[in-house]
Amino acid sequence: MHLINVKIRSALKHLGQDKIYGSAGFLIGLIFPIVAFSIHYNTVGRGFSFIEQTDTILNHYPALWIIFLAPIVMALFGHRLGRKNIEINNIIREKLNNKYKNLIEEAGDVVYSADYKGNFTYFNQRIYKAYGYTPEELVGKHFTCLIVPDMMDEVSKFYLNQFRSRTPETISELQIIDKSGEKRWVEQTVILIQQDDYVSGFHCVVRDISQRKIQENSIIELNNKLSEKLKELEFTNQELEAFNHTVTHDLKSPLRGINSLIDMINEDYSKEIPKDALELFYKIRSNIDRIQVLIDDLLEFSRSGKATLSKEKVDMKQILNDTILEFTITDPSRTVEIRIKEIPHAFCDEKLIRQVWKNYISNAFKYSSKVNNPVIESGSYIDGDKIVYYVRDNGTGFNMKYYNKLFTTFNRLHNYQDYEGSGVGLSIVKRIIEKHNGSVWAEGKPGEGATFYFSLPDVNACVREKKGKTDMPVFHNYPEKPRE
């Protein structure tokens, strides 16, 4: 077993290794690089000692056991390695520092550092582009010199609390003053520089959020205006409810009284009253009835807007049949051809949907009353995720250029003398269907009839899509089934 202390030129000669391996002069340039340095430099350099068997390459000597003692190696030439490592580390550190410094200087946000007193010690160049200050103007000054006076106490307390609590990082919003004197909103991230239990300063990243604040203030202003409008609307609704109460009690009651008086006059004095006077009484009675219908429609329109939906599965065909039967019984002398096609169920508020069918069917009966062979048809079809229901008649129809007035309140496309009505019914239909997330529309031609539609969400749309879809994979190259 032999000892090598890896000091190349002197140690090998003194140990007489030329007797073992060959000439020492040859070994000086060969043995150490091959046996020791090239293999074990990193291991010995880190302070590890070890024993290893190595093959000799000269004079056909057998393998030898060699002890590598790290302390000896490091003592002999470690001072050179140490000095070299320090030089390398300094070069690397300098390159990294330059790299990160360039990165900070070119950052899109302002970056600065301050000491434990709050005095600026560094600014990147972004401070000039963003706020007009040069780094030299600010270094040495206290960080509060940029803060608007109104926020000085609040900001100081916030960061004092961060220092006392040793909170590593905080994010806050505050206003600063730029070089031109303009106030700017910023979001500031402060990171403490801590050494053991001592805060030596802090690093900070400043991002301008002035535009964001303008947008936020606009949203707040819009919300405030919206709140005011909602209050006005609530007040209007309260007034409307008071009006409804007035209409119900204070207007309808006198009208009923007038009708009663007219009936009494007709019963007691009909023989004594001239025929012309009786006709005037009839017109008075007719106008009173018209007013009562209008009042009822107004109340219904008001209720339709406040109604709470109670959705359930509804048999639409049954509702349609009931509605048609009601109008048929009312005027049994009329002969109307009724055609009912497929009418699927719907998920809706049954009470409100009855009003929709009643209005559409009522209009169909009304506006087909002056044709010789009236036909009313009702059906449905699927349109994407909606079920569309319709009622069609071959009656008077309407001109499409007046379509925009059709579903608005108190707008009529026909004279009251020709067709009775208040002009409220279709607006009630529109309000009810829109509460169900549906739509209403119509098509018509003068003298050729009209078709009125309404749509409701189709709750079975997803089910139908799954039934029609196949998950079976398609293989283009599988062998065909042999023909029998």
Image (cartoon, rainbow, N blue to C red):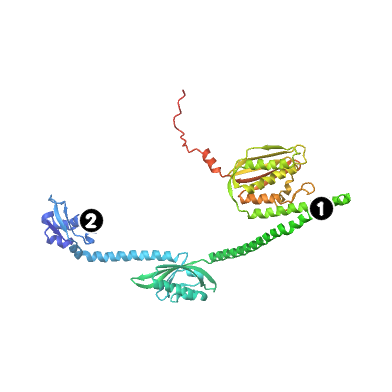
Badge 2 or badge 1: first in the primary sequence:
2
Query: What label does residue 38 carry, if any?
Result: 2
Residue reaching furthest to the top: 484
Where the N terminus falls, by quadrant?
bottom left
| Foreground residue among 134 and 185 | 185
Above or below residue 287? Residue 96 is below
| Residue receiving disc 1 | 264
Q: Is residue 235 left or right of residue 395?
A: left
Residue 39 position within the rendered picture, expressed as x and y whole percent measured from the top left: 22, 55
Residue 228 location, quadrant: bottom right
Q: Amino acid at mark 1?
A: Met
Location of residue 231 in the rendering, given as x and y in whole percent from the top left corner: 62, 63
Q: Residue lying furthest front in this view?
A: 268
> What residue is shown at x 60% (from left), y 47% (from top)?
348
Three-letter code for the amino acid on which mark 2 is drawn: Ser
Q: How many marks?
A: 2
Mark yes or no: residue 199 visible.
Answer: yes
Circle 1 Cα neighbour tier, 10 Å, few/some/many (<14 / 14–19 / ≥20): few
Along the viewing direction, whichever of 149 and 97 lies nearer the viewer: 149
Quadrant hosting residue 314: top right
Q: Secondary structure at mark 2?
A: helix
Q: Is residue 445 visible?
A: no
x then y, percent, for residue 214: 56, 66
- Horizontal side of 257 relative to 211 (left or right) equals right
Mark 2 vs mark 1: in front? 1
